[in-house]
Amino acid sequence: MAAPPNGAQAPSEEDLKLYALQQKYTEEATKRLRPELDGQFVDLKNAGESRVQKLGRDLWADHAALNARELIKDGSRYKFVILGGGFGAQILAVRLIEAGLIKTREDLLIVEAGGGFGGTWYWNRYPGLHCDVESYVYLPLLEETGYVPKWKYSPGYEILEHAQRIAKKWDLDEKALFRSKITAATWDDEKSLWNLDVAESRGPGEEPRHLKIQCEYFLPAFGILATPQVPRVEGLDKFVGPMFHTARWDYSVTGGSQEDPQLTGLEGKRVGIVGTGATAVQSIPHLAKYAKELYVFQRTPSAIYERNQRPTTDEEWSKIASHPSWQLERQSNFASYTTGAPHPLPDLVNDEWTHLPGLRAQLGSPLYGLIPPTPEAITAHITRLLKLNIPCHERAHARITSIVSSPETAAALKPYYPVWCKRPCYNDEYLPTFNLRNVHLVDTNGEGISSASETSIFAAGKEFPVDVLILSTGFRTPLEGDGCPAIKMNVSITGRDNLSFTDKWTKQGATTLHGIATSSFPNLFFQNAIQNGSGANWVYSASIWIEQMVSIISAAEKQAAEKGGKRAVAEVTVAGEEGWAGVMMQHAAYFAGVGGCTPGYGNASGAFGQIPKDQAEMMKKARLAVWSFGLESYREMLEGWRKEGKLEGYEVRVVEA
Ligand code: NDP
């Protein structure tokens, strides 16, 4: 916020508070910015043989059972191939089935890297894992499955069971190839088919199987935070004690299980945990119960709001699920209240998510219209958002002061960044943990751990000997490669005229129609949180993208049938995607507040906030925007587009064979 010009009215008390806070925010963010940006992390994409790369291996796959399954034949052809086995993939499969597009077993293959369904809930099994979005809006297909979540916020194992429930109900298991990665996807324009190269892991010590398969539609559903990462610090490879990433929790070391987290294996041990993001916040209270000494290495504190967990009662459920389409209505209600959009009903979820208006800076809102890309308009917009943030900031700080007894620890736990910069946490056990005598907060004042040795972690200028080391250091940013889907899923995609997906995205910047498809890549629809509408509830966002893609596929297939053809090829036109990129660029200025955030995965470790080196780079950044009026408005816009029935921005060809 700029100081008032000479002769202008004296600043109000609120202005002064805002100014001081913003200065502090900038100071803290600048302190954390590293020249190597995301290069400070090693990603665990390809589990290798080094100590660190091994941390990415799959601990959960039942290789014997999976090896006994019928083999997918090399050279098989499918109508649809979905990449991924998380909720995005499952909802898509169910919607394709419901639309009558899957008739035989050969119509669908799901290729998933893990040993089962669940996506993030397959990989993450750490103690304390819960979804912090209300289960009644998060768990997909509740009406269709008739499942009643046991808690307002589901534990991870309940969510994983739900993924298995969905697989069972829609026979998805038999359509899945687990432990497999699609490495290349190449469009054959003559045959109008995708050729996919697949590597199927057969377990430790076994050679992977390499398959070539074909499909009419290639549908990647790769999720948002799929690749764990660890800090690239000197000596981590040398640590001799047990060490693991929270996304691969090793219960053989800690004892207990996800369902019963009695971590008795840690009794008498000095345990170090690096990171204090949403994952660490959920697991630290459990570690504290068992470790002899727990060292929490903090680089940036998280903002912790109330959880208020409670079981689902019959009485409450009868009110929640009282009429058909209740879940969609509730999801839409939640999206509306998080973005300040009007909704005919009161706030149904009514938790901290809907009480943090500062989040509109990231989620969009219909309240403020388009923000013109002028310094004055952007400054006024950021000032307005910072004002919305003040009560959020004060609540988070007051909570720490009232719970944490040591003033020094309380001060170190206080976050200094706007609420939208990092995922807010909702937890009632984390802060009281720091009153326990065996729990030690090692605040590194934004620096992070500096190195490791065979037996210790070095941080804040001191050595901390630990027996067990847990890395809760997050995931590869979704902005990797400017949000390019091919880079994120690590697939080499080649479209018409030998065009590389990655080259197109890298040269032009993000280029899609409505965020789900791009020209030169026919019959390819992806779920990616760029150039579309996106909200706090990933499942609801994905459902909206899926509704759009399935309706396009259905309409294209119908056209093909009416014209006497056997199948359809739907492709975005250049005019369609460039028109949409223009719309997104108009929405970009709204998100200016995110640029100045403290580094994290939301701004690619600060890269997103750096001043573009030229006009071309600035335009590319602007193309990474999402629909700034919020998710509900995006959904309504797509509904209007579908109602017109013109498939505007797509070209459909009919194929005979
Ligand atoms: P985060 O990226 O949020 O946290 C990583 C942590 O590691 C940060 O505290 C980071 O500090 C710290 N870190 C990184 N490098 C170092 C270093 N060199 N030294 C010390 N600390 C370091 O990952 P999480 O796994 O916690 O969460 C990721 C996301 O997953 C969440 O934001 C949320 O979207 C999702 N999630 C959702 C849950 C749910 O309930 N639905 C539950 C858990 C996670 P710094 O902040 O300074 O970078």
Image: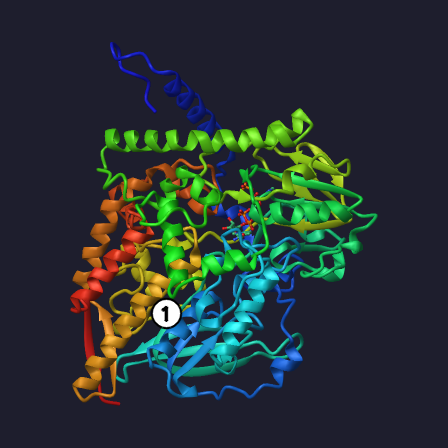
Residue at 41%, 52% in the rendered image? 479
Using the image as rendered, state which of residue 524 and residue 638 is in the foreground.
Answer: 638
Using the image as rendered, state which of residue 24 and residue 394 is in the foreground.
Answer: 394
The answer to whether residue 648 is left or right of residue 456 is: left
The answer to whether residue 423 is left or right of residue 371 is: right
Instruction: From the image, tell me which residue sits under label 1.
Output: 493
Residue 617, percent from left and from top: 29, 45
Say above or below: 406 vs 441. above
**From the image, which quarter does the N terminus lie in?**
top left
Using the image as rendered, state which of residue 512 and residue 206 is in the foreground.
Answer: 512
Tag 1 secondary structure: strand
Residue at 51%, 75% in the rendered image? 167
Residue 507, percent from left and from top: 29, 56
Instruction: Residue 5: name its quadrant.
Output: top left
Using the image as rendered, state which of residue 322 and residue 516 is in the foreground.
Answer: 322
Residue 165, percent from left and from top: 54, 73
The answer to whether residue 86 is left or right of residue 642 is: right
Residue at 55%, 44% in the rendered image? 426
Report crowding for label 1: few under 14, some 14 to 19, many 20 or more residues within 10 A (C-alpha).
many
**From the image, which quarter does the C terminus lie in?**
bottom left
Q: Amino acid at mark 1?
A: Ile
Residue at 62%, 86% in the rendered image? 68
Name of the residue lying farthest toward the right: 268
Say above or below: 17 vs 447. above
Instruction: Residue 487: name its quadrant.
Output: bottom left
Name of the residue lying farthest toward the front: 315
Q: Is residue 141 visible?
A: no
Residue 19, percent from left and from top: 40, 22
